[in-house]
Amino acid sequence: MTTIRTLVWGEFRHEKKNPKVAKIYPDGMHETIAAFLRRDPSLKVSTACLDQNQHGLTAEVLDETDVLVWWGHMAHGEVADEVAERVRRRVLEGMGFIALHSAHYSKVFKGLMGTTCSLKWRESTDKERVWVIAPLHPIAAGLPSHFELPAEEMYSEPFGIPDPDELIFISWFTGGEVFRSGATWRRGNGRVFYFRPGHETYPSYHQAEVQRVITNAVHWVRATVRIPDSCPSTPALEPLPPDPDAEDRSSIAHT
Ligand code: ZN
């Protein structure tokens, strides 16, 4: 059995500031997510958070990570550009990346998407109905045709993302809006999955269907290759005709 080295990254700020959030997630949202992932024996799960040295995302840690799960909200701007770029490059090499809820506005996700990633939102009394529109997709394995979160923050289209490679979930909210709530992209050699639920004041990460989706997604985005970026000059595989400009060309620096 292949072990998938999974790192759950949490901002871990709301839990320290808001007693309501602390009550739902006493050890932090990242620890709740890590705890249900650990029930899967094929996952080796660790956690990291914003206030650690380099946000717990050193090159050494990323070297040992096949999948990074990311929850951030109030402190996207405190993530160092250098660290966000390190994570983005690691995804291009092959690491899987799962962006949860307000991670749509994280530096890493926006950097991978290259678009605004903006949306409309509302904190009110909406419920969310998540429709499975790609039931054959491995991320939807074991799910019913739809499931409901009794209370959630509303996110609405237009969602400023590039067209997904695959759209797996669409959410409907009590107020009438819809949102592309589960989508995948390939970026370089890495796979990216965005999943919408998980506002900090609701117990969404305790809900079985949400746990199923995230667990399935870890398997689906897992790194299968690691190909560091390079742009080398390369010798021909077959003999080439004589090159009359070889001397001139050798004096030009290529990058
Ligand atoms: Zn939220």
Image (cartoon, rainbow, N blue to C red):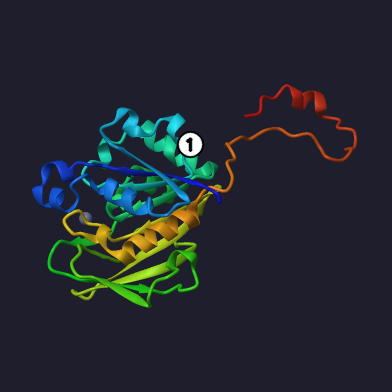
The residue at 53%/45% (across/down) is 94
In the picture, measured across the screen, residue 40 lies left or right of residue 159, that is right
Task: Tell me: residue 33, above or below residue 150.
Answer: above
Residue projecting furthest to the left: 19
Residue 80: x percent and y percent?
Answer: 32, 32
In the picture, measured across the screen, residue 249 lies left or right of residue 59, that is right
Q: Quadrant of residue 16?
A: top left
Residue projecting furthest to the top: 251
The residue under label 1 is 64
In the picture, measured across the screen, residue 100 lies left or right of residue 166, that is left
The residue at 22%/56% (across/down) is 199
Task: Tell me: residue 118, above or below residue 13.
Answer: below
Q: Quadrant of residue 195?
A: bottom left
Residue 151: x percent and y percent?
Answer: 18, 67
Task: Point out the image quarter for the C terminus.
Answer: top right
- Along the line of sight, the residue nearer the viewer: 250 or 80: 80
Residue 125: x percent and y percent?
Answer: 13, 68
Which of the four quarters of the rendered structure image does ligand 1 lie in?
Answer: bottom left
Local crowd size for mark 1, using a 10 Å CA cut-off: few (<14), some (14–19), many (≥20): few
The residue at 20%/64% (across/down) is 152
Residue 162 visible here: no
Q: Quadrant of residue 215?
A: bottom left
- Along the line of sight, the residue nearer the viewer: 215 or 89: 215
In the picture, measured across the screen, residue 203 lies left or right of residue 253, that is left
- Along the line of sight, the residue nearer the viewer: 70 or 83: 70
Residue 48 visible here: yes
Task: Tell me: residue 74, above or below residue 52.
Answer: below
